[in-house]
Image: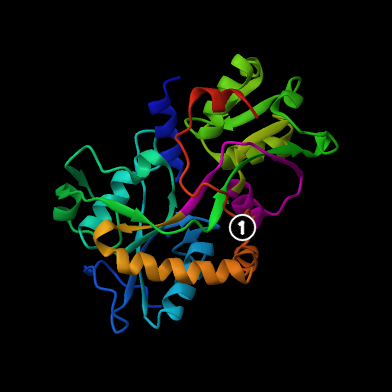
Amino acid sequence: MKPARTLAYLIALACPISLAGPAKSQNASRPDEALTVCLQSNDPPLSSHGGEAPGGFDLALSQHIAQDLGRELRVLWFVSRDDPDANLAKDANALLSDGRCQLLAEYPLLNSTLERPHAPTAKLPPFDGATPEDRHRWVKMNALAATRPYRLDTRTVVLSEHNANRTVRHLADLDDLRVGVQIATLPDAIAMNYGNGRLIEHVLHMPDARDLFRALQAGKIDAAFVDARAFDAWRDAHGSAGLAASGYVHSVAFNMGFIGLASNIPLITQVDAVLADLQAHYAVAPMAAKAGLTFIPPETPAVRPDVGPTALQGD
């Protein structure tokens, strides 16, 4: 598998108080102006909009930052398309460059996601309040700058109840099990490349992470290799009956931070100071726990190399 395709998988995962609509914001960082943050609208436990009330870890973190800066928080909810061709880097750049928000949360800090965009323009992703013109308009992209990271995004193994006592220190410990993965995701790429294809004959592909957990409960698969936050989302909505956390964490992980325009460094610096204070007082983990997110602190270096073939083959 080509490294560029692997990175496409990763970006597709990466990856949303006044809940304001699409009013444009400029690169100002004055205390009397609202802080506008773009959050994904359906990515629990990180951010979600709809149902009883908006919530999630990234919303709580954004609220704290705005409060610390003495500013009102306005959230623009958007959707990063859930398909293998989605590109959060372009979506984020378009939203920021179009002045829709000053910051975008939950951005993977990798060399390729922070480099100056090669394409001059990009289309806006779907967002609350978008007009027909917005859906077809091309936005000129600009250089981006990231804050310091606030958490580490990881992958884990979830076991069926029948296999709850199995020790998983390496993916090789799943050799004789039926292993489910969500198609076209980073766990999929790792599972298919691990140990030069060691698990291929045991891997079952499913379209959605929720299908994996249902299959585990029904005994149709023995283990699921998933993003840790997907398991958090399932437990928050459905509980953990019939499922067992293995405690395994794969080495392919990346730091998450806020992203803004490079022309707005004063704001990035202000947010860095707030994040540094939160981390110094160990305040991020409780915030994550309240939102139902398994928290792992960020690691050095803050910005990591892209995921290559060697990383996909190991633990």
Where residue 285 appears, x then y in whole percent?
Answer: 63, 64
Taking the image as shown, residue 86 lies to the left or right of residue 202, namely: left
Taking the image as shown, residue 155 lies to the left or right of residue 108, namely: right
Give the residue displayed 32% in from the left and 82% down from the top. Answer: 31
Classify 224 as above or below 32. Answer: above
Q: Nearer the viewer, residue 194 or 157?
A: 194
Give the residue displayed 20% in from the left and 50% down from the top. Answer: 135
Asked whether the viewer can see residue 52, the reply is: no
Q: Badge 1 local density, few (<14 within 10 Å), some, or many (20+)?
A: many
Where residue 298 appears, x then y in whole percent?
Answer: 57, 53
Where disc 1 sits, the SS reads loop
Q: Is residue 140 magenta?
A: no
Q: Nearer the viewer, residue 150 or 286?
A: 150
**Residue on which the image places disc 1:** 293
Where residue 190 appears, x then y in whole percent?
Answer: 56, 27
Classify 173 as above or below 213. Answer: above
* Rendered image quadrant of residue 167: top right
Taking the image as shown, residue 59 lies to the left or right of residue 289, namely: left
Question: Which corner quadrant holds the C terminus?
Answer: top right
User: Which region is colored magenta?
Assistant: 229-256
Amino acid type at image mark 1: Leu
Q: Is residue 246 magenta?
A: yes
